[in-house]
Amino acid sequence: MTMLRVDALDAHHGLLHAVRDVSLEVAEGEILALIGANGAGKTTLLRAIAGAHPPTRGRVLFDGADITMLPAHRRVRKGLALVPEGRRLFSGLTVEENLLVAGAAARPGPWNASTVLEVFPLLRERRHALAANLSGGEQQAAAIGRALMTNPQLLLLDEVSLGLAPVAVETLYRSLQLLIERSTTIVIVEQDLDRALKVSSRIVCLLEGRITLEGRSRDITRNEVTGAYFGLRGAKFAEARVS
Amino acid sequence: MTWINQVVQGVLLGGYYAVLACGLSLMFGVMRIINLAHGDLVVLAAFIIWLIVEQSGASPFVATLITLPVMALIGWALQRGLLERSLRTGMLVPVLTTFGLAIVLQNAMLQAFGADMRALAPQIGDLAFAGWAIVGEIHVGQLSILIFVAAVLLLGGLHIFLRRTAFGRQIRATAEDADVAELVGVNARATFAAAAALATATTALAGALMAMRAAYDPYSGPVQLIFAFEAVVIGGIGSIWGTLVGGIVLGVAQSLGAQFHAQGFLLAGHAVFLAVLAGRLLVDRIRSGEGLQRTLGLDS
């Protein structure tokens, strides 16, 4: 069943046309990876889906309902949550307070402060620390935990491994695996191509705001993705490497 | 003994400044708006209380309770109708907006109530002048004590509200990052409007206390604004307890200044304000790595 449908979406940052005529669908239980270079429009697309960035054209449908005009906090109540790029915790609040702010408007569901701390054990002993004093990995775990507190049907994860130590990324993905097993639908932006291909069931590649490649993760080769990533045709790219 | 007395009186005066500054501090801490109409809202609240007392013969304390939700509603409407729109354009437009609002309020009140001085002192009986002797020559006014207690209760209550309750947590989160607050399900617009209502409701209390302790007219607002602003800056912007401390420091400075010289009251207050401001800038520059010598221009 289609959970999210993006229909011919355009979004601008002032004069910059960041997302161009993007249409995509996410089915229930699916893990979709969004891939693309810096500035390809991944973050803007996620923010437009979450309601944090008003699109200039097109529609966003969630669970069959048109939510294009809905403010972000109302989308959260419908079951859409975004973990923003750069984590953006409320730094003057403790870890627990960060979770509870998100929990206040939560839909009924399995997630609450104690189940979140179960999935992210590294946060348990830090729950009374100010978010500003956490390490990068702890902050990212708290940011994901905060989004989970709203009991989302669809979780949008923007660059969760950005700026983290490899060990922290490993820990994080082990926790994410738990979410995946609990059949949460996820759209993930990930720069690490191998990881993106491994964790996702389907990938969408963006280049300068447009979709250049789309397919099931296991059918797509690394070369095809690299070509789409840099705007080269798969074949041409292969030739270029040979010569 | 005279000096001790001046300090005691200054601390009590500081309680009044803290009540006055509380709403200003909250507006700035949450919405990043420097509300230049704050003093005039305090005067407006005083006029509303005075009007209720005049018309119905109710006690000023009952009239204050009635005025609290009225001012809250005015604050909500201001945020929704005026400040929210002006905030979209950056920092400067809200300052100009509240400056314009201040002028509108002053002249509207002059039109409605005339230029006469008013006071609520006659309506509160003995409380206006009665006092207690503590030790030796030190007497404290009952009204001053009442104001100080009100200040501690108001600021302490606000502090607990912001730190301990779910709604307080929501206000702090939205103040820090409204964009992200929306993304975790908080209605940022409604939260800001509620915070503005809360901040403006405090002007009812400030207005009542102002009218009980002194006379006021439609143009009394700007002076109240200056005292409130100084208390907020001395105490540290956005800190609730800091506002109480700032009010007390300002009150003590003014009170001691008046002991030195008849003109010293205002002068000493402004001097402390400027000294704290200069001290902060100095500390900031030293912390930012410029070093003491360069900051003071001694290295050249």
Image: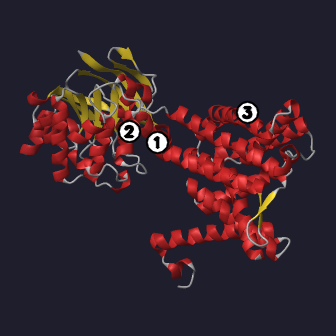
Could one spot residue A180 in this view of the protein? yes
Location of the C terminus of chain B (image quadrant): bottom right
**Which residue in the structure is indicated by mark 1?**
B169
Tell me the amino acid under the disc marked 2: Leu
Q: Residue at x 32, y 42 (%)?
A: A143
Of residues A38 and B79, the one nearer the viewer is: B79
- Residue A216 against residue B243 in the figure, above or below: above
Circles 1 and 3 in contact, beta carbons < 8 Å? no
Location of the N terminus of chain B (image quadrant): bottom right
Q: State which chain disc 1 sits on.
A: B
C-alpha separation, residue under disc 3 versus residue under disc 2: 34 Å
Whether labels 1 and 3 share one chain: yes
C-alpha separation, residue under disc 2 versus residue under disc 1: 8 Å
Q: Nearer the viewer, mark 1 or mark 3?
A: 3
- Residue B22 against residue B277 in the figure, above or below: above
Whether labels 2 and 1 share one chain: no
Residue B151: x and y in percent read 66, 52
Tell me the amino acid under the disc marked 3: Ile
Circles 2 and 1 in contact, beta carbons < 8 Å? yes
Residue A189: x and y in percent read 25, 37
Of residues B132 and B49, the one nearer the viewer is: B132
**Which residue in the structure is indicated by mark 2?**
A100
Secondary structure of residue under mark 3 = helix
C-alpha separation, residue under disc 1 versus residue under disc 3: 28 Å
How many numbered discs? 3
**Left or right: B27 in relation to A71:** right
Secondary structure of residue under mark 2 = helix
Quarter of image, res B266 = bottom right
**Which residue in the structure is indicated by mark 3?**
B66
Tell me the amino acid under the disc marked 1: Arg
Residue A239: x and y in percent read 9, 39
